[in-house]
Amino acid sequence: MKKLLNKVAVITGASKGIGAGIAKILAEAGASVVVNYASAKAGADKVVEEIVAAGGKAIAVQGDVSNTADVTRLFDETSKAFGPVDILVNNAGIYKFGAIEEINEDDFHSQFNTNVLGLLLTTQGAVKNFNADGGSIINIGSVVSSITPPGSSIYTATKGAVDAITHVLAKELGPKKIRVNSINPGMIETEGTHTAGFIGSDFHAEAERTAPLGRIGQPDDIASIAVFLASEDSRWLTSETLLAGGGIR
């Protein structure tokens, strides 16, 4: 029997990369999936098409997670299509690395707006739409909050905030039977890491050299952990931060 049969999952930033991988595997496990995207409509539509072609249920819903009105619409559309929410994956995020001398206000606000405010607003929206049985919130953090690499001060600060928020909300939402956990990936090969020039770089080589498992990750490596955290298999886990970087810490 599929672990997430009859469950409804909302995945933010799911048009590509880790989010797309999670959307596909949650659907494969039986969930009806909402693929949220900010601007990459073609990518989101492709993810939905692949899920439907494989026999799953999915819709794409545009929305900026840092905008309250967009978040309200995201959950309104979810409710109309599938009913109450059981699973929220806060995956939407952006990053920009740079030395302290290069930091500017726009970099700070753009990363904090998406990575932190967006997570809070979507969680707020989901809590209003969870059913009486509660459910699972999965935040996508990053191993950077543990390894604190040079040039990542803003991004690392946002992911440190995700760690802290995970622990706070686990306590706050536990009485509502809502579990809150975080997956903190290491370097993952995605469209984004290719575009940013990380793949094939010295940073890539160092990640492979220092990882006990000897490689960087793939979206499916994270997606399978998300299924575990979304399912009853993890029913006794909340407030956990799972490092998923092939042993890097």
Image (cartoon, rainbow, N blue to C red):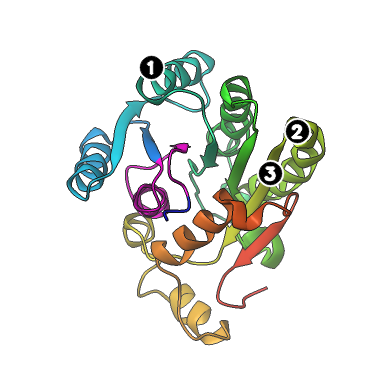
| Separation of marks 1 and 2 at Cα, in angstroms | 24 Å
Q: Which mark is residue 173?
A: 2
For the residue pair 86 and 16, the one nearer the viewer reads as 86
Q: Please identify the quadrant where the N terminus is shown.
A: bottom left
Question: Residue 248's x, y, as percent?
Answer: 62, 76
The answer to if 7 sits in the magenta stretch is yes
Q: Please identify the quadrant where the C terminus is shown.
A: bottom right
Does the CB distance between marks 2 and 3 fall below 8 Å? yes
Q: Which residues are magenta?
A: 4-31
Precedes in sequence: disc 1 or disc 2: 1
Label 1, residues with CA under 10 Å away: few <14, some 14-19, many ≥20: few
| Separation of marks 3 and 1 at Cα, in angstroms | 25 Å
Q: Which residue is mark 3?
A: 180
- Mark 3 lies on a secondary structure that is strand
- Name the amino acid type tagged 2: Leu
Q: Would residue 33 be found to the left or right of residue 103 on screen? A: left
Label 2, residues with CA under 10 Å away: few <14, some 14-19, many ≥20: some
Nearer to us of marks 3 and 1 is: 1
Residue 244 shows in this picture: yes
Query: Vertically, is 199 above or below 162?
Result: below
